[in-house]
Amino acid sequence: MADFVMPTLGADMTEGTLVQWKKREGDRVTKGEGIAEVDTEKAVIEVESHTTGVIERLLTKPGDKVPIGTVMAVIREEGRPTTSPAPAQEVARPAAAPHLAHRTDTVVPSPSQTGRLRISPAARKLAAERGIDPAHMQGTGPDGAITLEDIERAAAVAPGVTKPAIVADRQARMRQTIAAAMARSKREIPHYYLSTTIDMGRTVTWLKQENETRPMTERLLYGVLLIKAVAIALRRVPELNALWKEGAAVRSEGIHIGTAISLRQGGLVAPALHDADRLSLSDLMTNFQDLVKRARAGSLRSSEMSDPTITVTSLGEQGVETVFGVIYPPQVALVGFGKLVERPWVMNGQVVARPVIMASLSADHRVSDGHRGGIFLAEIDRLLQEPHTL
């Protein structure tokens, strides 16, 4: 038997609310398949199974607030002997949440099982709060799903509908959880900071020429080149691609870039772009656009929230030229990029105007030092001088 537990979906999470089960007792699940939706303070996340087998028991019900680490379900793994199910009243309750009882009558089938309207749980909840009927709405989310943004737009034009206090309260709670994580980071992690200015002339020129050969829908954003450069640079300085666990840094085999994404309703999330160093620029662009769309639609997966090994953030769109971020535990580094600006630059003894960008590194001094951090930033710079190699 394998326990399906409430995962940690970020350093700022202590518990999650079960929104719905996507499977019933007796259903087969495969490793990586989403079987539950959990509402955190930031978003509704699809939690994936870590094993393949058959769901033996569901121990929590929709609406329960479940602390991280609490057993939510029991899965009989493939190849393991079947055990006789105990009566519901005899099922052992999770030690971390003794009030959670075994229930099957309140399992909520997934939309695919019932043919119901495609709408994220968070959007359905907001629709009820705003007095909006989503039945006749056209969704803009993945596969036509109705998103939080769709509900917000509908509420903006609906007569007599005002923003309820509960929505503002949710935003306030999100800020509180983010603040708690950042306070913990500054309290526990000895940060050091480095920055460098990178000449982006070659990158901008190459990107313009490359995009002229591509259809409009397949053109690249220069931000994707920044992400790819960070991912490849981590191969040279792998100690920055690590997680701090139980008093030691554990290097990660995969390079999964956490990408900071602002949410329309306020706050931000930083889900992972998996194996970013191995993806082509085209695939990385496609995955990035999909990640942003699903983050803002409230349909991220648990692995995308738990897997980042380093975070990249950019505030260039807001006009910020330099970013010194706070490391997101248990990660040990964060890379920031500012606005692409034109500045005087000396080339071959001549002062010329060049497009430049400020790159910064916030790193954990328990894991690396300024020398290694400097090598890392220099490698990013070198890669961006050869954009065709990314």
Image (cartoon, rainbow, N blue to C red):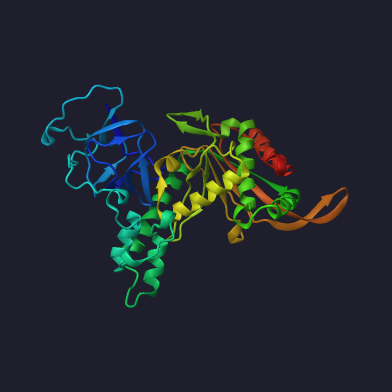
Of all residues, the one furthest to the bottom in this rendering is 159
Is residue 18 found left or right of 221 in the rendered image? left
Is residue 378 found left or right of 125 in the rendered image? right
Q: Is residue 325 visible?
A: no
Q: Vertically, is 65 above or below 51?
A: below
Q: Is residue 26 visible?
A: yes
Q: Vertically, is 276 above or below 166?
A: above
Is residue 302 found left or right of 62 in the rendered image? right
Residue 286, given in percent of the width and then of the height, sits at 55, 48
**Residue at 87% from the left image edge and 48% from the top image edge:** 348
Q: Quadrant of residue 235?
A: top right
Q: How many marks?
A: 0
Q: Vertically, is 98 above or below 318?
A: above
Q: Quadrant of residue 26?
A: top left
Residue 107, given in percent of the width and then of the height, sits at 22, 46
**Residue at 40% from the left image edge and 45% from the top image edge:** 12
Residue nearest the observer in this picture, 88 or 335: 88
Residue nearest the observer in this picture, 247 or 299: 299
Residue 72, given in percent of the width and then of the height, sits at 26, 38
Q: Quadrant of residue 165?
A: bottom left
